[in-house]
Amino acid sequence: MVEPSQSMLPFFADTKLIVHPDDYVLVSVPPDQGAEAHRLWLRPFSSVTYDHGEVSLVVRASEWTVNESRFSGAKVEGPYTLITFDVVLNLALVGYLSVVSSLLAEEGVSIYVLSTYLRDHILVRKMDSEKAVEALTRLIERSRLQIKE
């Protein structure tokens, strides 16, 4: 596992994990359906990302079920659990997610990363969410102990 550097320890020590209770799905729709997706999912927590070949959505599974008939040719994966790292990260901080991803890789947990200006979020398969949260909680607690030393 990639260990947090001394400069990262305060950020991990201050991290609070928010495990969102709803199931989420990751959806890919053709670019010509992006405007429709944008209109439907502009509320917390959702993500609409435009790429040259697709529009990717991260939305609550229940919301997708209600609206999926509006989108032909969509590819859907899930259910996922959304985990938010509730700590405001300095944009110059290097390696925060490399620690997270290497820890979860060692646990056999695949992640899908979403970043906003202030916070990072990951999606993990629902069946792996307990294992992911336990590993991340141990990392946070270990960081808090190292700062106290």
Image (cartoon, rainbow, N blue to C red):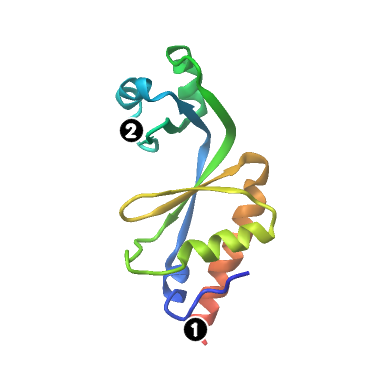
The local crowd at label 1, few if under 14, some if 14 to 19, many if 20 or more residues have their Cα within 10 Å, is few
Q: Secondary structure at mark 2?
A: loop
* The N terminus sits in image quarter: bottom right
- Residue at the far top in the pictured view: 69
Residue that carries the numbered disc 1 in the rendered image: 148
Asked where in the image residue 33 lies, by quadrant, the reply is top left
* Relative image position of residue 53 (x, y in whole percent): 42, 31
Q: Nearer the viewer, residue 10 or 6?
A: 6
- Residue 130 falls left or right of residue 92: right
Q: Residue at x 47, y 12 (%)?
A: 69
Q: Which mark is residue 43?
A: 2
Q: Nearer the viewer, residue 41 or 149?
A: 41
- Marks 2, 1: nearer the viewer: 2
How far apart marks 2 and 1 lie (CA) works out to 39 Å
User: Is 40 placed above or below 129 here?
Assistant: above
Q: Is residue 108 rendered to the left or right of residue 141?
A: right
Residue 67, percent across and down?
44, 17
Secondary structure, mark 1, is: helix
> Residue 17: percent from the left, percent from the top?
49, 55
Position of 141 with respect to 120 (left or right) is right
The amino acid beneath tag 1 is Lys
Is 92 rendered above or below residue 66? below
**Residue toward you, 35 or 52:** 52
Q: Could you say where residue 103 lies in the image, as x and y percent from the top left?
A: 61, 63
Q: Which mark is residue 90?
A: none
Residue type beneath disc 2: Arg
User: Residue at left 31%, top 53%?
Assistant: 117
Q: Residue at x 62, y 41 (%)?
A: 125
Query: In which quarter of the view is residue 49 placed?
Result: top left
- Numbered marks: total: 2
